[in-house]
Amino acid sequence: MGRLTSRVPLVRVTVADDGSATTIGRPDTVVAEEPLEIRVGGEAISVTMRTPGHDFELVAGFLVTEGIISSVEHIRTQRYCAGATDEGVNTYNVVDVSVTVPVVPRDVARSFYTTSSCGICGKASIDAIRARSAFPRVSPAEGAALDPALVVTLPDRLRAAQRLFDDTGGLHAAGLFDLDGNLLCVREDVGRHNAVDKVVGWALLEGRLPLRDTVLQVSGRASFELVQKAHLAGIPVLSAVSAPSSLAVELADEVGMTLLGFVRPPTFNVYTGADRLRAPDLAATADGLAPVP
């Protein structure tokens, strides 16, 4: 079954209308979660909890979305290195990257731990994160129009491409679509931020950055961190099936991104960048909204 999933025993409990419970024991498939240590030039800068697979994409995307690199030419090599068990078996849980650009000392000094649930913790300041973008702010008017009828189809298109979700039910997904709804790349992970980094890493290694005229559809909520990652990759539209945070809305507005939330057919919410959507009254409706106290 490989390292992507594992089989574990469980007890299924069923509660009847009268309050009585029946139980049955059976095996279940769960998604794998393992640590990945990211090193740059031999120096550890992060440990993230992730689903094994597409590790080089994850690391490359992480370096992009942390503002350390912005081009595939900035990567000399990536390799698995130390991390063997006591028996000498490589765990493939340590990746070292050699880069062609200088790494600012604060980048390495601010080593942090990333969980699969909360994303990156311990950053020096939000203002510092905002300042790291390699790509300029993009006006909604500069991008091609996005059809609302297409937007409401993206969650189902993403779900159809999730190969491991059916087996485990425990994975987030990020899918990159063009403006015609064609799926360019999909990645799954226990961490939504890792899934996004894997997509960005794929795009970097394919020489596609910046990702103009694309939509990033995510399976969960839209956090500040996901807006940051999408912006650093040049993605103009972030669409989420759940809610955005207040800081995500603020950052998306600052950088000119279209942020969509609660994308659940037949409706969705537009929080920023309404001008990018192809709907005659949408932008006017957004402009006419009174400021919220």
Image (cartoon, rainbow, N blue to C red):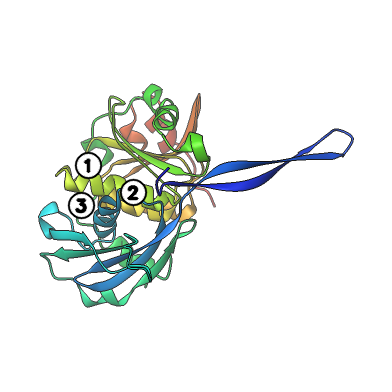
Residue 180 visible from this viewpoint = yes
Q: Amino acid at mark 2?
A: Gly
Callout count:
3
At numbered mark 1, what does the secondary structure look like: helix, strand or loop? Answer: loop
Secondary structure of residue under mark 3: loop
Mark 3 burial class by Cα count in 10 Å: few <14, some 14-19, many 20+: few
Q: Amino acid at mark 1?
A: Leu
N-terminal-most mark, 1 or 3: 3
Pointer 2 or 1: first along the chain: 2
Which residue is pictured at 52% across the width and 48% down the height?
Answer: 292
Mark 2 secondary-structure assignment: loop
2 or 30, which lies in front? 2
In this figure, which residue is indicated by the disc labeled 1?
Answer: 211
Residue 75: x %, y % from top left: 14, 58
Density class for disc 1 (Cα within 10 Å; few <14, some 14-19, many ≥20) is: many
How packed mark 2 is, by other alpha carbons closer than 10 Å (few <14, some 14-19, many 20 or more), is some
Q: Which residue is mark 2?
A: 53
Which of these two is toward me, 233 or 97? 97
